[in-house]
Image (cartoon, coloured by chain):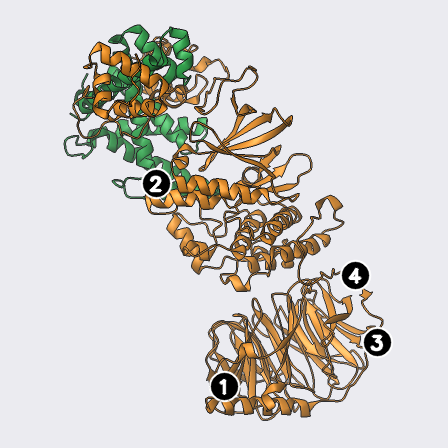
Chain colours: A orange, B green
Amino acid sequence: MAISACPTKAQLKALVSGSMSDAEASGTTEHIGGCTDCQAALESVAISGDSGVAEGGTGGVPSDVPIEDLVGQAVGSLPPTDSAYWKAVAAVSGQFQTQDTPNVDANDTSETLAPSSESDADQSSIPLDPDNTPTIEAASPVALPFLKKSDDPAYIGRLHHFEVSRVIGRGGMGIVLEAFDTHLQRNVAIKVLNPEYAKNDVARQRFCREGRAAAAISHEHVVAMHQVAREDEGEVAFLVMQYIDGVTLEKRLQEQKPLPPNEAARIAMQIAAGLSAAHERDMVHRDIKPANILIERGTERVKLTDFGLARATDDVRLTKTGMVTGTPLYMSPEQATGATADEKSDLFSLGAVLYEMLTGVSAFEAPSIVGVMKRIMDETPKSPAKLNPKIPLPLSELTMALMDKNPARRPESAALVAETLAEIISGFGAVSPLHVPAVAKTAGKTRRSGSHRLVSRNTLRATWAVGLIGVASLCAAIFLATRSDSDGAVQADLGPSFPSTVLAGNPGTVWAVDFDPSGKKVAAAIEDGSVRLWDVASQKVLRSFDAHRGIVWMIQYHPTEPIVATSGNDGMVKLWDSNSLELLQEWDAHSAVRKIAFSPDGRRIVAGDHDGVIHTWDIDSGRPLASVTQPGSIYSVDWSPDGRLIASVGSDKIVRIWDAETLETRQTLLGHEGPIYNVKFAPTGTQVATVGWGKTIRIWDTATGLEERQLEGSSSDNWSVAFCGDGTHAVVASQDGKCRIWDLASGELVTSLSGHESAVHNVSLDPVAHQIATSGRDGTIRVWDLSELKE
Amino acid sequence: MTRATLLLRLRDANDHEAWSDFLRDYGPMLYRFVRSRGLQDADAADIVQDVFRRVGSAIGRLEYDKQKGGFRSWLFTITRNRLYTYFEKRKKAGPTGNDTAQLELLSQAADGRNELSEQWELEHLRSLAAIAMKTVEENSDPKTWSAFRITAVEGRSAAEAAEELSMSTGAIYVAKSRVTARLRAEIERLEKEEES
């Protein structure tokens, strides 16, 4: 007779220890047969040692370990018969054996070491001679207690209407199975939440919720989520997903590292495309890593999986151990510090994955989790191009931009990243339409770069009036701003209050920008070798043409003629007709030229190259005038306003002042602690300003050779410096993404212009109106309108 | 042979009997433990072999009485160090996420409870359970034992066992729990013996 009420714990104890009366035991037993609660309670009494069979003591079996986990076939078995383990054991014992009784047959030794057949009935083919091991595929049953027996022997079990054919993998979160959906007649992948997590309600709910959210994403680069389900009786929660026949990127990288740059870019592009679809729905992945990126066999298509699931497991990991485990290698700095992960975190992780694909090394590898996190937060890895010059600079730059510590400075969106990568890939050659993913819409339309083409037939209206008046009025405006600041009416950081026109979508870092003489257009030197001419007011590209092989480092308008000069990484210095864009003149410096400068009369040009050579050329005749070599590489040169001096700076940390005619040394100015990136003569007087490695801006007097002033306030290295027309203010572009204006009389920081997402490389002043143009690594040019300051 | 005796005898590299006992008792758990760190069969076997050799050369220096936690924790230290070296080497060849995670675990304090030490203890319990099963099986009614074997070892359902053994489902559960309790007691006994 079955008793209806559940037995107490004491009764269960008595039942297990056999101290219960037969009659009572029989009733209780019958009850247990039909009561799943009691079945579980009984097992827990038995394993916990509360049953009185054993004297309770310290140690022993933890009560939360199910007996199946100790004796199950899969867990406690001996190494498989074909395991190298048996050879290892034989080798060790053979070693002792030979020392002991050298004449004993090795076979005897191994026999005693290998398990005898009676000790484990399930291991039917234990080799007697380990060196002659039959290579029988050892049956490796996996404990899948949630599976029901399948009717079809071809399957290992059944879950709902899914016939499970094999275990694909095991991860921290659970087991992934390949199964056949008998209702819809298709293959699926089933992810079963680790029972350990399933016990945690919060984790299970999250798992299901994130699964449902992921089901809303439909994209060719996201593994489709079909169904979120729970096993009726047990505590098994599982997700049914599209089955992808392929390998994970983790596996791919184990086989081949690094990947060819075009392949890495393609994979990253497709990841970015998949992310853009999720981000559009406000879904953040949170755990972008090679193990979550699948590559489909045959098509090589990339598929993202495990959207948002990291969140479900974090709950458990945190509550269980007090810290997040797992690999932080691809974690963003904000995740490492425990802040909420957002879309920009996914972009960081994508950057870390791309970095590993390109370089073959993890960007933040360290011997410990804490070490990795510290590196993620504090260190910037060497750029991929630095590690391998064959990696195209745009790709390298993008990787580094993705891994910017500051989320605000990373590329704007996954969609933009996908588009940028598509452009980079098109540089490798034709892209199969199969590989160009659908991308969630971006704010701005992408403009693809290509070979020489006219974007607009509008020809340049050459208004070559030299606008020194304009520059002077800009200075006046700044002066007024300073005044109002001292009155307390204006905040010190005026940055956000200045309107700027953004010229975005350039195909890579814009290394230099210059206003045309009208002040209505800017010309941009871009790292993909092209030059773009933008109309500021309409924000349209008027012209775009390929100027150099490799990076265009500098672009500068001639002081009086309709000529524009460019210099590039290919060592060429070129003069173009700024109306027709005809090439007028070119010189070969034989190594990369990062900076050129016209003489004030416009008859000569100076260039400093990577090998430390300064060249001066006559523009009309094309004739070389003089040259001199200095140690290291030259990063910048400038011509003094009176035409008599040339300044050069570079990697050797010394500012050199030369006679412009003879290139004889006039001064060497010492003080910089690192490479100097830019040098600029003041428009009047004898001052020169230099910026570079380190935060300090230095002003020197070339007449005395003494340092006159240091300007502090920048929070990082500075790339470029310019003077306003009357020389009262200096404008500095910084690595920290800001452009700052200093009052040279007081040495005070007047304002800083914020807006660029990453390093600002160049700054140019509009000769006519109150405008400053800045360009930078984020591929944008910003034209700042400072005219409001006049009032 | 008691554990203490075994350890004393292991000091003699030529004591074949002691060594084969040692390999029998600790080899499989070492192998399983090393595999649980994500190593392939061949690599795991190499490491197990290496650990055995180190035990052979270092056992003379083990002061058994003073070593807190006994021989097992000493063996754990050796194994952990060996694994650390392995992952370090792999990391240089080209690291994976697992390598980093493992190195982190391996470098945590030896006495701290973490996934690594828990896995180690679990593998040890599994080895003890395998020994205990023999004793318990000999002392159990065959039907009771079968109920346990089908459900706990083979992982089949209680209903199946009930049908196969012509018992009620409730009786299967009771039988399983009785054997479980006995096994637990036996494992505890073996553990005390090992530590004594």
Amino acid type, residue under disc 2 in the picture:
Leu
Q: Secondary structure at mark 2?
A: helix
Please tell me the numbered disc located at residue B106. Answer: 2
Q: Which residue is mark 3?
A: A459
* Residue A290, position as x, y percentages in the image: 54, 43
Q: Residues within 10 Å of mark 4 (few under 14, many from 20)?
A: few
Amino acid type, residue under disc 1 in the picture:
Val
Quadrant the C terminus of chain A occupies: bottom right
Whole-Å distance between the Cαs marked 2 and 1? 57 Å
- Tag 4, which chain? A
- Tag 1, which chain? A
Label 3 vs label 1, nearer the camera: 1
Q: Which residue is mark 1?
A: A490
Q: Which residue is mark 4?
A: A451
Q: With A662 as the anchor, is A384 left or right in this view?
A: left
Q: Residues within 10 Å of mark 1 (few under 14, many from 20)?
A: few
Amino acid type, residue under disc 4 in the picture:
Ser
Residue B20 visible, this angle:
no
Determine which quarter of the picture holds residue A47: top left
Q: Secondary structure at mark 4?
A: loop
Amino acid type, residue under disc 3 in the picture:
Thr
